[in-house]
Image (cartoon, coloured by chain):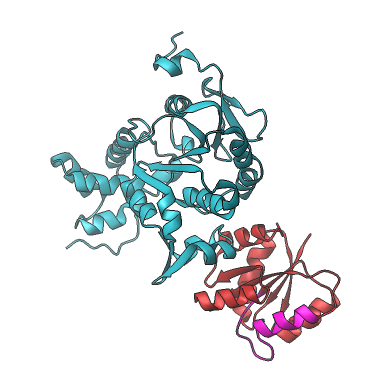
Chain colours: A red, B cyan
Amino acid sequence: MKNCLVVDDSKVIRKVARHILESLDLTVSEAVDGQDALTQCEASPPDVVLLDWNMPVMSGMEFLQALSSARMEARPKIIFCTTENGISHIKAAVEAGADEYVMKPFDRETLESKLAIVGVI
Amino acid sequence: MADMSAAPTGRLNQGAARLLSGMLEARTGQTLSEGRAWRMETALRPVLRDHGLADIDALAARLLRKSDADLEKAVIDALLNNESSFFRDLQIFDMLSRQILPHIHYERQDRTLRIWSAGCSTGQEAYSIAIQLRNDWARWNGWRIEILATDVSSAAIERARAGAFSQMDVQRGLAIGDLIKWFEPHGDDWRASPELRRMIDFRQDNLFDPAAPSGEYDLLLCRNVLLYFTPERRQVVLGLLARHSHARSVLLLGAGETVIGQGDDFIAHPEFRGGYARQAPLPAHAVGRVRRVG
């Protein structure tokens, strides 16, 4: 069973994402910011990270930059999941190494299709 | 003024429901399954509101009282299921890009590619194929490419032709790289690039009275369409698709659809799993439109 790390400072978003991801047969772990996510990734890399943009302590973009220099066996797929829906934000995320991009609000079908595109399901 | 804020009652007048179902079948060939019939009230609420009608009984009465082409068109468009998404059933598109399109490229010495998306809804399927071709342009550059996309719903075709899709639409199935490359922000929505829109000929057309398709197509897609038809009508549609196929054409149906038990126009494709090939030679009834008896 593949693992998804949900990184979001909103408890509600984490809960909604967990509900959808578990219904897609993924195991789910949670992180409240980029630093928390980085610590978890270094300890046990997930298959995919669902990553918010704006978070305290360490933002999604800062997490991406830190992840690129982290020592890990396998780099997880990164799906940005954010309210930043402008084309400039999307391009910046892709250039920084995001594999996919979900614009909030999202639903089950959206997450499912993005996970299929990155090859996790 | 009628109260349009009320929720669907779930007590649909059976006479009105039969009238509307009959109208849908007469105009489009589609039958309303039980699962869609109960949604009739919800689907028709915008039509009731736009025409100042209190309920479906009033709508039925209006339709019986006088001919109103605009109202009939609005009812038909509302009742049709226009659900679609980009790269729907990803494995099919994977097979298209890795096997079927390269195969056609190898076969067609005249560098002509003809594709028909029959029952294209709001166009996501046709745009998905156009994206695949554009992403492999080194292979297809210089080819004459025709993509015909037809649907019985004029509202769906208008949307498809405009190429404008909501944020939710583009997130379903479309890879972010393709969104950046082939779409532009359009207010709160996204619009397909002119290069993509120019590749596709969207036409409102009825599979039971077809005017748009001509000649033979290398690739025919009729996905999640047959399921709305009776077995007899499915055979009619497959006969039409067969007449617009050649011996090496590939037909793709929806994931839950098959040609088995639907006449003898098509057989399982010998090379492409899930695809279908025209029976060769074409059965006599398909050539001469003569129905086999007995």
Q: Is residue B41 shown to the viewer in this render? A: no
Say if B150 sits above or below B263 in the image: below
Q: Quadrant of the C terminus of chain A?
A: bottom right
Residue at 53%, 38% (x, y): give it: B111
Q: Is residue B184 shown to the viewer in this render? A: yes
Say if A98 sits above or below A25 in the image: below
Residue B215 horizontal/vertical position (percent): 42, 29
Residue A37 horizontal/vertical position (percent): 74, 80
Q: Out of A69 and B39, give the one closest to the viewer.
A: A69
Q: Out of B262 and B184, give the one closest to the viewer.
A: B184
Residue at the outermost left position = B66
Residue B244 horizontal/vertical position (percent): 45, 28
Residue A56 horizontal/vertical position (percent): 65, 90
Q: Out of B246 and B19, give the one closest to the viewer.
A: B246
Q: Is residue B88 left or right of residue A58?
A: left
Q: Which residues are magenta?
A: A51-69
In which quadrant of the rendered view does residue A47 lie?
Answer: bottom right
Q: Out of B260 and B264, give the one closest to the viewer.
A: B264
Residue at the outermost top position = B294
How many numbered circles does the render carry?
A: 0
Give yes or no for residue A65 being in the magenta stretch.
Answer: yes
Q: Is residue B46 left or right of residue B240?
A: left
Residue at 51%, 74% (x, y): give it: A87
Give yes or no for residue B86 being in the magenta stretch.
Answer: no
Q: Quadrant of the N terminus of chain A?
A: bottom right
